[in-house]
């Protein structure tokens, strides 16, 4: 799209909009996570696996419920789970009593979660230093309110 055409779009002077800013912040967080995982010897965790290592943890969850939560087909999830099982990050086990399959992190999977939490704590500390304690607190509180995490 040419710059002249772009300038004709109503509201263009107000970009980037909040969605783009949130996406860019998320991309920064994800890049740090992947970098830190690689530095910790967990570089085989790629971006496509990241949805399985986000809050809240999936440990003990049924695959069908997880597929709904992350918005993928059961077949696509089965493929991801198979890859992560081969890499020894998780396992699927039949639950006693009801026979349903559930997903459980291995020791290696829990290490990924611990590493991600450490990275996010450092990211928050860095952003708090950059914005100041009050502005960062206000930002986080506003995001909690907007997302229903009050």
Image: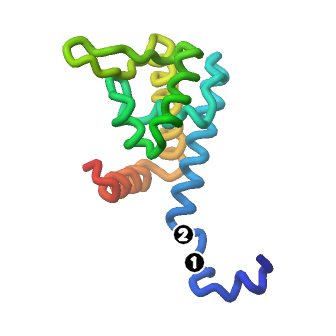
For residue 27, above or below residue 81:
below
The residue sitting at 78% across, 80% down in the picture is 3
> Quadrant of the rendered structure where residue 29 is?
top right
Q: Residue furthest left?
A: 97
Side of 49 where 57 appears, left or right: left
Residue 88 vertical placement versus 43 (above, below): above
Quarter where residue 86 is shown = top right
Report the side of 13 relative to 2 (left or right).
Answer: left
The picture places residue 75, in percent across and down from the top left corner, at 50, 35
Residue 100 shown left or right of residue 6 in the figure: left
Nearer the observer, 91 or 64: 64
Q: Would you say residue 120 is visible in this rendering?
A: no
> Which of these two is toward me, 24 or 68?
68
Q: Nearer the viewer, residue 125 or 35?
A: 35
Q: Residues within 10 Å of mark 1 (few under 14, many from 20)?
A: few
Residue 77 location, x and y as percent? 49, 34
Instruction: Estimate the spatial distance between the alpha carbons at disc 1 and disc 2, rounded to whole Å.
Output: 7 Å
Q: Is residue 43 above or below residue 27?
A: above
Asked whether the residues under the numbered discs 1 and 2 touch, taking CB atoms below 8 Å apart as contact, a structural biologist would say yes
Task: Tell me the residue that label 1 is attached to.
Answer: 14
Residue 128 circle label: none
Q: Is residue 97 above or below residue 138?
A: above
Residue at the image position 51 percent from the left and 17 percent from the top: 89
Tally of marks? 2
Q: Label for residue 17?
A: 2
Residue at position x 39%, y 35% in the image: 66
Rendered residue at 62%/81% (across/down) = 13
Is the N terminus in the top left, top right, bottom left or bottom right quadrant?
bottom right
| Secondary structure under the numbered disc 2 in the rendered image | loop
Residue 55 on image: x %, y %:
39, 36
């Amino acid at each position: 799209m040419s710059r002249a055409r772009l300038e004709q779009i109503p509201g263009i002077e107000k970009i980037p909009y909040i969605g783009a800013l949130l996406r860019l912040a998320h991309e920064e967080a994800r890049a740090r996570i992947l970098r830190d995982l690689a530095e910790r010897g967990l570089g085989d965790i790629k971006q496509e696996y990241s949805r399985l290592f986000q809050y809240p943890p999936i440990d003990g969850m049924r695959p069908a419920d997880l597929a709904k939560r992350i918005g993928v087909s059961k077949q696509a999830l089965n493929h991801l789970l198979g890859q992560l099982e081969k890499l020894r990050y998780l396992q699927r086990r039949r639950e006693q009593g009801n026979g349903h399959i559930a997903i459980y992190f291995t020791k290696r999977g829990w290490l990924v979660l611990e590493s991600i939490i450490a990275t996010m704590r450092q990211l928050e500390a860095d952003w708090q230093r950059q914005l100041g304690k009050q502005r960062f607190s206000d930002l986080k509180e506003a995001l909690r309110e907007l997302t229903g995490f009050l």
